[in-house]
Image: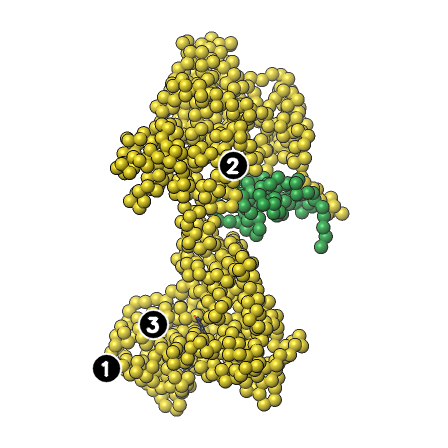
Chain colours: A yellow, B green
């Protein structure tokens, strides 16, 4: 025996339920459909084009008599259901009771009417159904006047529709801007301008006081005294769920009829769907979620497991010529961030609201072509971090010409050098690839490119990708930062091969996605440019991390530490006195001996820095660069001068090395140690570069570490004389400076390029001399004491506050 | 509206900041690469780092202590901050 299913309301939601149900199980139910409107299901949202004359009612009917007939749906149209009797399981309509086994309430919403004086006058309509629409159409004689109360989605569609029918239309809106629930003020303003440009009058912040008229509506009076003549008034100020039947039947009702995930009300045989329901405290006013509800309900009725999960919805205004789009949540809030694009000339406004790595909301006016793409990102909760900087330009821009990491490589001339070690240019690699070298190994074998230090591997792969297209799968080398798709190695190489000599040039030519980079790439680029173009590039102070900018390590309380250089760890009574004086004079809270054989004055206030530096300078001391990605210390033992085991003057060599290397900027900090014999009291074998003196000369080892990683140095080479030792070490540091990625300590870099390669470079005398010469060239520019530089009279002012208003304000 | 002269634009380095002391604490006055100016509390809401010492990029600043990124336009912390 078939169950009897009764449906109250033939609206958008119940229409979908019937479709799904009769499709899934054509014979499961004996269905009766009641509707208060004297017609079956039609596409309510298309009433606007009907009002404007762009469509006819016939065109928007979704279910006609024939449809109901073939699906066996009995219809009772034009009569509202007035009562539900849950005990008897009957509904009453026009005095007739109908039995149900299962009941669906799909009564939609009722338009809200402001109960001002005159609201019942003939000529006052709402905007909900065909009757309302037809009333407005009937009033539309050319020159007739319409007042629409409510500048939301519905009100504006009504206003636009009537205007298209030749009426003079005024929109009265209580809020400061139109469609405040979907639009922010900027978009609301543009919408208002464009509606006004078509001759509509928009009155924002207008509160309706009364509707005036005798037999029918004649005018609308506002609180501020304004009066607008009206032949018809359309009130579109909101809707509320139609819950009267459910209330009378004592179902659970909040603002809407309460339903669970299966769309079941508090009575297990009664279900509800559409705008009349409340699910998890949420109401629904757009069709997309209602369609989802309908599908869930159909499945639930058939005993299938199904749960309604609301998804975000997007809004478009169906007013021809007004292009606006709104989706998600675009309210301001803590942790939320805006990306805004405006083109005043074209009247385009776009705003994206981001929280964390997700897009939360989008509002667009004037150009909504990308609306659905943004909506997809919102719905899917896509991580937008990688495309954040170009997000607002839409999908076309993602991977478009400017953002294409390959573009820079593709644009390189064939003569551009890709592999610096082996002098291989792009053309040679392309030839090899076209000649059949389709893997990295084959390219390496035929051209030698990327077969030495390997830093150009990423670039070689990009050349392969450009040449081979899709058939090439690139490596997963991490990019420099989120501003670019290039790796550090690529950027270094491209800086050289394109000849990029400023940060803006790098960002422009290599397609940086951000404006001005970020705190991660800026210091790196500044370093690369310093290292590669010592005489042409000018150090960009503002791209430096605070420690290097202020030449002191910032402490957690915002004070700094000051460490004067003590060459090779050797000091004098005069220097110690000057340090002690400075400590007293500037109330230094902590004086500490460091592991690098010098003295650290901790807790110095920023404004005291210059005076303290001047004092220390006056005593002959210079900055110890204890804060720098550069040469820190050269730790020494006492060597032959005082130790009975010493084989060479380790202290003297340490001092000479420190005097040679100080002031140089390096990818990460560099610490040296020189021990006078293999007993190694200076702990030279856990330094970036260590020298152990032996009878026959000097053993130079590199790539040690004693930090988070602890590593013993690896043997680089032997040297006979002090001079040779110094040249080798300077050349090796220069090799590191030119090839490592920023922030990689020497041991990390050596692990990448291989110790063998380093040894080859240093052993080749031409290469070694050239490295040494380039190092000295750089030193000619950069070996300057920052303390002396920064305390020159013209630079002193910058250390003080720009202004001190604390006294003024206190008065 | 009460105007107080705190100095000239040229007193602030591009992509940098200077501090103005007030009775309520220090205010960091920023100048971007495009010569836009912003003023925010010098103290990072995370652990009080001096934002005036951060690296300025676009219209954002990265706190020197723990690399939190703030929009100079809204004062809001931005995504992509490390840890915490
Ligand atoms: C002019 C207009 C434009 C819109 N534009 C859009 C749009 O662009 N996009 C969008 O997503 N949404 C739009 N909407 C909203 C959308 O139409 C509604 O969300 C949707 O129609 C709600 O569906 P529903 O089935 O819950 O209710 P409805 O479609 O309102 O159907 C409810 C039906 O139940 C009947 N009924 C009520 N009580 C009883 C009773 N006691 N007995 C019998 N029958 C009863 C009513 O007469 C009505 O026919 C628009 C609405 C309007 C009015
Ligand atoms: S390393 Fe050798 S030379 Fe230097 S102090 Fe120790 S024992 Fe003496």
* Residue bearing the label numbered 2: A502
Q: Is residue B29 above or below residue A593?
A: below
| Callouts 1 and 3 on one subunit | yes
Picture residue at 30% right of the left edge, 71% below the top: A299
Q: Nearer the viewer, residue B18 or B22?
A: B18
Mark found first going from the N terminus, 2 or 1 = 1
Mark found first going from the N terminus, 2 or 3 = 3
Picture residue at 39% right of the left edge, 15% below the top: A718
Picture residue at 51% right of the left edge, 76% below the top: A164
* Residue bearing the label numbered 3: A297
Q: Nearer the viewer, residue A789 or A800?
A: A789
The location of residue A44, given as percent across then percent down, is: 42, 76
Instruction: Decide if residue A216 is on the left or right side of residue A44.
Output: right
Q: Nearer the viewer, mark 1 or mark 3?
A: 3
For label 1, the SS is loop
Q: CA distance from mark 2 to mark 3?
A: 63 Å
* Residue bearing the label numbered 1: A1
The location of residue A661, given as percent across then percent down, is: 51, 22
């Amino acid at each position: 025996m078939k169950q009897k299913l009764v449906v109250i309301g033939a609206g958008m939601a119940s229409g979908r339920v019937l479709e799904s149900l009769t499709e899934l199980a054509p014979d499961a139910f004996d269905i009766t459909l009641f509707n208060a409107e004297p017609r079956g299901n039609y596409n309510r949202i298309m009433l606007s084009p009907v009002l404007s004359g762009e469509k006819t009612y016939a065109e928007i009917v979704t279910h006609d008599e024939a449809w109901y007939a073939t699906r066996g749906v009995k219809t009772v149209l034009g009569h509202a259901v007035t009562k539900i009797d849950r005990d008897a399981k009957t509904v009453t309509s026009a005095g007739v009771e109908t039995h149900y086994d299962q009941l669906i309430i799909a009564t939609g919403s009722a338009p809200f009417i402001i109960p001002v004086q005159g609201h019942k006058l003939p000529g006052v309509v709402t905007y909900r159904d065909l009757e309302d629409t037809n009333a407005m159409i009937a009033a539309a004689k050319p020159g007739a006047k319409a007042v629409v109360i409510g500048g939301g989605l519905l009100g504006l569609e009504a206003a636009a529709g009537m205007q298209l029918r030749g009426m003079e239309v005024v929109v009265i809106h209580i809020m400061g801007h139109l469609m405040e629930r979907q639009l922010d003020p900027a978009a609301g303003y543009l919408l208002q301008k464009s509606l006004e440009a078509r001759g509509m009058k928009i009155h924002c912040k207008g509160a309706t006081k009364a509707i005036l008229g005798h037999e029918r509506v004649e005018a609308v009076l506002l609180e501020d005294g304004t009066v607008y003549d009206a032949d018809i008034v359309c009130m579109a100020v909101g809707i509320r769920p139609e819950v009267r039947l459910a209330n009378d039947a004592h179902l659970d009702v909040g603002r809407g009829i309460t339903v669970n995930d299966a769309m079941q009300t508090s009575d297990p045989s009664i279900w509800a769907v559409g705008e009349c329901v409340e699910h998890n405290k949420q109401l629904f006013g757009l069709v997309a979620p209602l369609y989802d509800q309908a599908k869930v309900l159909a499945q639930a009725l058939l005993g299938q497991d199904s749960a309604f999960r609301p998804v975000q919805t997007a809004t478009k205004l169906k007013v021809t010529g007004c292009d606006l789009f709104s989706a998600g949540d675009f309210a301001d809030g803590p942790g939320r961030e805006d990306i805004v694009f405006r083109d005043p000339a074209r009247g385009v406004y776009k705003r994206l609201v981001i929280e964390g790595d997700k897009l939360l909301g989008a509002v667009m006016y004037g150009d909504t072509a990308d609306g659905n793409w943004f909506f997809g990102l919102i719905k899917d909760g896509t991580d937008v971090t990688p495309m954040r900087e170009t997000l607002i330009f839409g999908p076309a821009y993602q991977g478009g010409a400017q953002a294409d990491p390959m573009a820079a490589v593709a644009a390189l001339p064939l003569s551009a050098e890709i592999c610096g070690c082996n002098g291989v240019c792009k053309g040679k690699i392309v030839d090899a690839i076209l000649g059949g070298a389709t893997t990295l190994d084959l390219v390496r074998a035929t051209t030698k490119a990327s077969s030495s230090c390997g830093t150009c591997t990423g670039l070689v792969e990009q050349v392969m990708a450009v040449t081979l297209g899709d058939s090439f799968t690139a490596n997963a080398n991490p990019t420099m930062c989120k501003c670019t798709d290039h790796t550090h190695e690529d950027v270094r190489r491209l800086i050289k091969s394109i000849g990029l000599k400023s940060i803006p040039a790098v960002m422009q030519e290599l397609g940086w996605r951000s404006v001005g980079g970020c705190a991660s790439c800026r210091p790196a680029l500044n370093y690369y440019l310093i290292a590669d173009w010592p005489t042409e590039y000018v150090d960009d102070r503002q791209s430096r991390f605070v420690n290097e900018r202020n030449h002191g390590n910032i402490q957690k309380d915002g004070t700094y530490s000051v460490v004067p250089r003590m060459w090779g760890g050797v000091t004098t009574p005069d220097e110690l006195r000057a340090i002690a004086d400075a400590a007293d004079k500037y109330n230094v809270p902590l004086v500490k001996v460091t592991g690098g054989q010098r003295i650290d004055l901790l807790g110095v206030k920023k404004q005291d820095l210059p005076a303290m530096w001047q004092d220390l300078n006056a005593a002959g001391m210079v900055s110890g660069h204890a804060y720098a990605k550069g040469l820190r210390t050269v730790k020494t033992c006492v060597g032959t001068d005082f130790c009975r085991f010493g084989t060479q003057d380790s202290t003297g060599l340490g001092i000479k090395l420190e005097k040679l290397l100080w002031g140089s900027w390096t990818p990460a900090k560099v610490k040296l140690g020189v021990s006078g014999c293999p007993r190694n009291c200076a702990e030279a074998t856990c330094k970036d570069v260590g020298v152990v003196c032996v009878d026959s000369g000097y053993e130079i080892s590199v790539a040690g570490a004693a930090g988070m990683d602890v590593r013993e140095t690896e043997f680089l080479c032997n040297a006979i004389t002090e001079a040779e030792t110094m040249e080798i070490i300077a050349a090796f540091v220069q090799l590191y400076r030119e090839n490592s990625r920023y922030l990689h300590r020497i041991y990390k870099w050596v692990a990448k390029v291989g110790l063998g390669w380093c040894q080859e470079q240093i052993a080749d005398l031409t290469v070694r001399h050239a490295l040494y010469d380039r190092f000295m060239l750089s030193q000619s520019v950069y070996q300057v004491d920052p303390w002396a530089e920064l305390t020159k009279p013209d630079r002193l002012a910058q250390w003080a506050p720009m202004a001190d208003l604390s006294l003024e304000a206190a008065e | 509206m009460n105007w107080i002269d705190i100095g000239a634009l040229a007193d602030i380095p591009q992509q940098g900041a200077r501090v103005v002391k007030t009775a309520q604490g220090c205010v960091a006055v920023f100048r971007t690469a495009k010569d836009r100016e912003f003023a925010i509390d010098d103290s990072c809401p995370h652990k009080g780092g001096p934002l005036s010492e951060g690296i300025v990029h676009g219209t954002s600043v990265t706190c020197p202590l723990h690399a939190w990124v703030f929009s100079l336009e809204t004062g809001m912390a931005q995504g992509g901050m490390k840890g915490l």
